Each structure stands twice: as C-alpha cells, then as structure tokens.
Image (tube, helix red, strand yellow):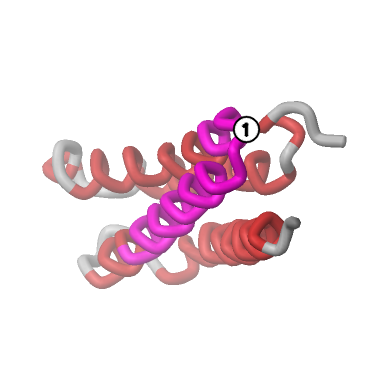
Amino acid sequence: MIDSYRDLIVWQKAMDFADEVYSLSKHFPKEEMYALTSQIRRAVVSIPSNIAEGKGRHAIAEYLHFLSIAQGSLAEVETQIFLAIRFGYITKELSIKAFEVSGEVSRMLSSLRSKLGNRP
C-alpha cells in the first residue's frame, strides 16, 4: 500500500525529470535567466509538486485534477525544451535523456489517472 506521495514511482520519476531539466537549463544563456530559464524551472517543479498535492488531498476527483495539471506542466516543459533546441541554447543530443524521462513520467501519469478513474 502506498501511504505517501514519496512512495509513488511517478513522483520519484518526476523528481528525476526536474533534476534533468535543471541541468539542461544551466546551458541557457545568462540573458534567459528571468525568461525561459525561470519559466522552465517553475514548470518542471510543478510536476512532482502537483502529484504530491493531489495525493495529499485524499479525494479521487481532486487527485485526478492535480494529476491532470501535472500532465499539462509536463507538456509545457517538453515544449520549452523544444524551444531551447530551436533557439540554439541546447542540442538535441543534450536533450535525449530529458525526453526519455519525460516519456516515462507521461506514461506513468496516464496509467495512474486511468486506474484512479476506473475505481468504483
């Protein structure tokens, strides 16, 4: 039985994704510190944060809502990584690991949402 959000593999993977994105954002130019760097960091932090908050609500409908927000934030971060590549701040090769982890988190979120949504 999972008692804490910290026991959730999806939360742990989202934390790994945050680590990866923070590392990537260190390659962004200094002039992006208050723009894309700040935005991508806020968005990636919101993924595990919303998973934790949803788990802490103890109501399935609210939990599903926060998981949906986490999924949206994940798509936001992926888009910002694509922009960073397009702007020449990072290379595609540098982003491979981040996209691998984001794919795992996305699949886990979808699976968890599906399982929770099918509960009696």
Magenta region, residue range? 52-79
Answer above or below: position of 39 versus 86: above
Residue under label 1, please give it.
58
Q: Is residue 104 visible?
A: no
Magenta stretch containing residue 75, yes or no? yes
Q: Which residue is drawn at the image coordinates 54% and 51% (left, top)? A: 64
Residue at figure coordinates x 54%, y 38% from the top left: 54
Percent coordinates x, y for residue 46 in the rendering: 41, 40
- Across and down, in percent, residue 7 comes to 76, 33
Q: Residue furthest right?
A: 1
- Say which amino acid is labelled 1: His
Where residue 111 appears, as percent x and y from the top left, is 69, 63
Quadrant of the drawing holding the C terminus:
bottom right
Return the residue nearer the eye: 50 or 119.
Answer: 119
Q: Nearer the viewer, residue 26 or 82?
A: 82
In the displayed structure, 53 sits above or below 37; it is: above
**Left of 61 or right of it: where is 80?**
left
